[in-house]
Amino acid sequence: MSGNGAVWGRVRGRLRAFPERLAACGAEAAAYGRCVQASTTPGGRLTKDLCAQEFEALRSCFAAAAKKTLRGGL
């Protein structure tokens, strides 16, 4: 059973690091938010794929953050 404690310790460490890694995606999140906001202002119309480029940049950033967290890298 002592092996399980080590595994859970690593998992907890990765989960604690994840918000810090996501914080590195602030610029991408802001760009996506601006795009969505501009599309939903009065008279604006949010349609599928309108902010696809911004969303893809944000998704890529989140995926990279998740990979770093899983690897335990910096």
Image (cartoon, rainbow, N blue to C red):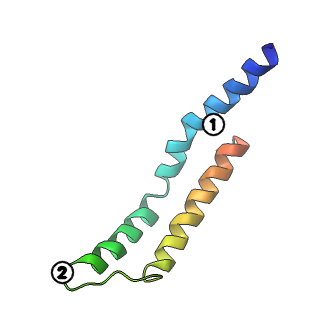
Q: CA distance from mark 2 to mark 1?
A: 42 Å
SS at mark 2 in the image: loop
Percent position (x, y) of residue 9? 67, 24
Amino acid beneath label 1:
Arg
Taking 35 as reference, is 16 left or right?
A: right
For marks 2 and 1, give the one nearer the viewer: 2
Residue placed at 48% from the left, 82% from the top? 49
Sort mark 1 into few (<14), some (14-19) or many (20+) by Cα contacts within 10 Å. some
Which of the 4 quarters of the picture holds residue 15? top right
Q: Amino acid at mark 2?
A: Pro
Residue at the limit of the structure toward the top, as seen here: 2
Give the percent coordinates (x, y) of residue 69: 64, 44
Which quadrant: the N terminus? top right
Tell me: residue 60, above or below residue 44: above
Query: Mark 2 or mark 1, which has the lower sequence index?
Result: 1
Where disc 1 sits, the SS reads helix
Residue 21 drawn at (x, y percent): 54, 47
Whether residue 57 is situated above or below residue 6 in the rendered picture: below
Q: Give the x, y percent position of residue 41.
A: 22, 78
Question: Which residue is identified by label 1?
Answer: 14
* Relative horizontal placement of residue 34, taking residue 71 as reference (left or right): left
Residue closer to the observer: 65 or 73: 65
Residue at the location (69% across, 40% down)?
72
Residue 23 shows in the view? yes
**Quadrant including the C terminus:** top right
- Counting every numbered tag in the picture gives 2
The one nearer the camera, 41 or 57, is: 41
At x 63%, y 51%, the residue is 66
Q: Which mark is residue 42?
A: 2
